[in-house]
Image (spheres, rainbow, N blue to C red):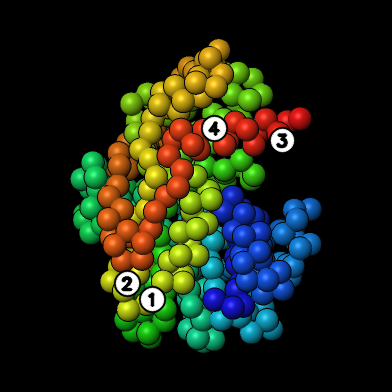
Amino acid sequence: MQKILVTGALGQIGTELVMKLREVYGADQVIATDLKSSAHEITRSGPFELLDVTNDKAMFDIANKYQVDTVIHLAALLSATAEEKPLLAWNLNMGGLMNALEVSRELGCQFFTPSSIGAFGPTTPKDNTPQDTIQRPNTMYGVNKVSGELLCDYYFHKYGLDTRGLRFPGLISYMTPPGGGTTDYAVEIYYAAVTAGKYTSYIAKDTNMDMMYMPDALEAIIDLMEADSSRLSHRNSFNVTAMSVDPEAIAAEIRKQMPDFTLDYQIDPVRQGIAESWPHSIDATAAKTEWGFKAQYDLEAMTKDMLVQLGKKGE
Ligand code: NAD
């Protein structure tokens, strides 16, 4: 990776990833793009361009203008929003991905896009979900993610394009709010703990899902992209995770720092339904053995850091 184009850069992952990539590879080397602009630091700390990823010509022109050698494609509609707007989700998630793959093929770029635990479905084994297993998701987001994994594999086999990807669990961060996913509760709960001392969860007790703290997700992207290609046999869909938790487990950890924190429930049937179709915990052995994946933050370490950082933000 030397000159990197990032799509969807103003989202939850993109804002932090662009800052990190600019630190590691140089500010001018990372071209941040998004549908809309904002006052966020990434629009000022290096190149920023407006880009609608469904516009293939505009994407090619920007990639060509900066002579990028890497495309990190993040623009997408997330699971809960995709369920509300399935047609938009298909057009954005599949159309944007196809454009990004084509631009990468034409310019010979290395390519990364995230998949998700949403790529699994109700018939997938739920505990210690294997790397290679049944994938019959029943959500539009899941259909998009499985199709995306297959499409990226196809571009590797057909054209030799260096495509790579991770199946992210719910990502937790204190910097940018999440963008309409099923695991958003696990971010909201920390904000609510700091601001109100209580939280009403839309996900039910005992609904375990995988999660990971954002610093580990950023490290994982860079480590996978820098890994020796010959060691990768899975390429586009590595299971990665740091913890499997339900709302009670997070609340119990928060109470270690804030004993008066209270949690109650008002279940959202749509997001609960999506959560129930996903694994309880996934097996990240392939990522560990093929490119050395290791998460630094468990629930305890993440909770401590989240509460400290959000406390500082509120000061
Ligand atoms: P997000 O919703 O926070 O951000 C998406 C960004 O894409 C937004 O800034 C939005 O403005 C932009 N965008 C929307 N439509 C666009 C278009 N037509 N053209 C260009 N940009 C457009 O999403 P995120 O959480 O940063 O997720 C990024 C990727 O990671 C997605 O593929 C998502 O499926 C995947 N992922 C995220 C998580 C998570 O917990 N955040 C977990 C698993 C996978």
* Residues marked 2 and 3 touching at CB (< 8 Å): no
- C-alpha distance separating marks 3 and 1: 39 Å
* Residues marked 3 and 4 touching at CB (< 8 Å): no
- Count the labels in the image: 4
Query: Residue under circle 2?
Result: 232
Label 4 secondary element: helix
Residue drawn 38% across and 48% down?
241
User: Which quadrant of the view contains residue 159?
Assistant: bottom left
Crowding around mark 4 (Cα neighbors within 10 Å: few <14, some 14 to 19, many 20+) is: some
Q: Earlier in the sequence, mark 2 or mark 3?
A: 2
Residue drawn 23% across and 59% down?
132
Eyeballing the image, is 235 above or below 269? below
Name the amino acid type tagged 3. Lys
- C-alpha distance separating marks 3 and 4: 14 Å
- C-alpha distance separating marks 1 and 4: 34 Å
- C-alpha distance separating marks 2 and 3: 40 Å
Q: Earlier in the sequence, mark 1 or mark 4?
A: 1
Label 3 secondary element: helix
Label 2 secondary element: loop
Residue 113 position, x and y percent, is 47, 65
Query: Residue under circle 3?
Result: 313
